[in-house]
């Protein structure tokens, strides 16, 4: 169990090490406001367990659907946070992610209850989503979350 967690942690660190240092970025880093809000599912912009949006002032707003366990909400928030920041770093716009997600959801077969748009081959943010998923899974391991129960609840949202 621990070796799996270490393998996951190594993968995350490897991915993060490929990001340019702050000194290599084109613009100096400005302080960022990050807000994480848990809301009823109906208040999300579209059918999803979590959502992220960069506001015009540069702040990041993460919205997570209410779940039966606070750890589940935390895991969705961690996924969204990592995905959003990696997308921003990679130049993948929120508009591109939103457009892909919405198109994916409209084409989703009724029998498909648990696939994620970010895992699809054509997702413009596939790499960022996969790294966020690995981070989420590692956090779940450390929080002693039963992944199958968690995944089932996330899929139901």
Image: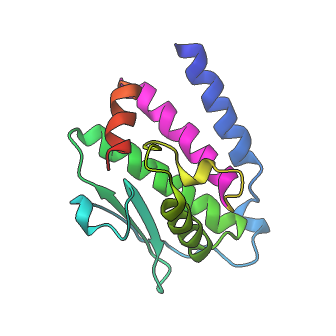
Predominant secondary structure, magenta span: helix
Residue 152 to residue 101: above or below: above
The percent coordinates of residue 99 (x first, y second) are: 57, 72
Q: Is residue 143 left or right of residue 10?
A: left
Residue at the spot 39% in from the left edge and 43% down from the top edge? 75
Colouring chosen for the image of the structure:
rainbow
Report the front residue among 123 and 32: 123
- Marker count (numbered): 0
Range of the magenta residues? 125-145
Residue 8 to residue 50: above or below: above
Residue at the spot 67% in from the left edge and 53% down from the top edge? 126
Q: Is residue 139 left or right of residue 4?
A: left
Residue 61 to residue 108: above or below: below
Quarter of the image for residue 4 reads top right
Residue at the spot 39% in from the left edge and 26% down from the top edge? 148
Q: Is residue 127 magenta?
A: yes
Q: Is residue 43 magenta?
A: no
The percent coordinates of residue 139 (x first, y second) are: 45, 34
Report the front residue among 137 and 120: 120
User: Which residue of the protein is positioned furthest toward the front in this rendering?
Assistant: 110
Report the front residue among 94 and 156: 156
Q: Is residue 45 left or right of residue 83?
A: left
The percent coordinates of residue 107 (x first, y second) are: 54, 60
Residue at the spot 56% in from the left edge and 23% down from the top edge? 5
User: Which residue of the protein is positioned furthest toward the bottom in this rendering?
Assistant: 56
The percent coordinates of residue 42 (x first, y second) are: 24, 65
């Amino acid at each position: 169990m621990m070796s799996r967690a270490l393998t996951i942690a190594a993968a995350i660190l490897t991915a993060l090490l490929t990001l340019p240092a702050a000194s290599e970025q084109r613009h100096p880093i400005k302080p960022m406001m990050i807000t994480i809000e848990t809301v009823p599912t109906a208040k999300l912009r579209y059918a999803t367990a979590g959502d992220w949006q960069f506001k015009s002032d540069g702040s990041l707003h993460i919205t997570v659907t209410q779940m039966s366990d606070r750890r589940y909400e935390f895991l969705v928030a961690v996924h969204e946070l990592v995905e959003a920041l990696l997308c921003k770093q990679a130049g993948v716009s929120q508009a591109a992610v939103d457009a892909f997600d919405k198109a994916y959801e409209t084409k989703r077969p009724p029998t498909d209850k648990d696939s994620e748009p970010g895992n699809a081959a054509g997702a413009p943010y596939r790499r960022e989503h996969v790294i966020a998923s690995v981070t989420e899974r590692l956090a779940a391991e450390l929080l002693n979350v039963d992944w199958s129960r968690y995944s089932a609840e996330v899929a139901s949202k």
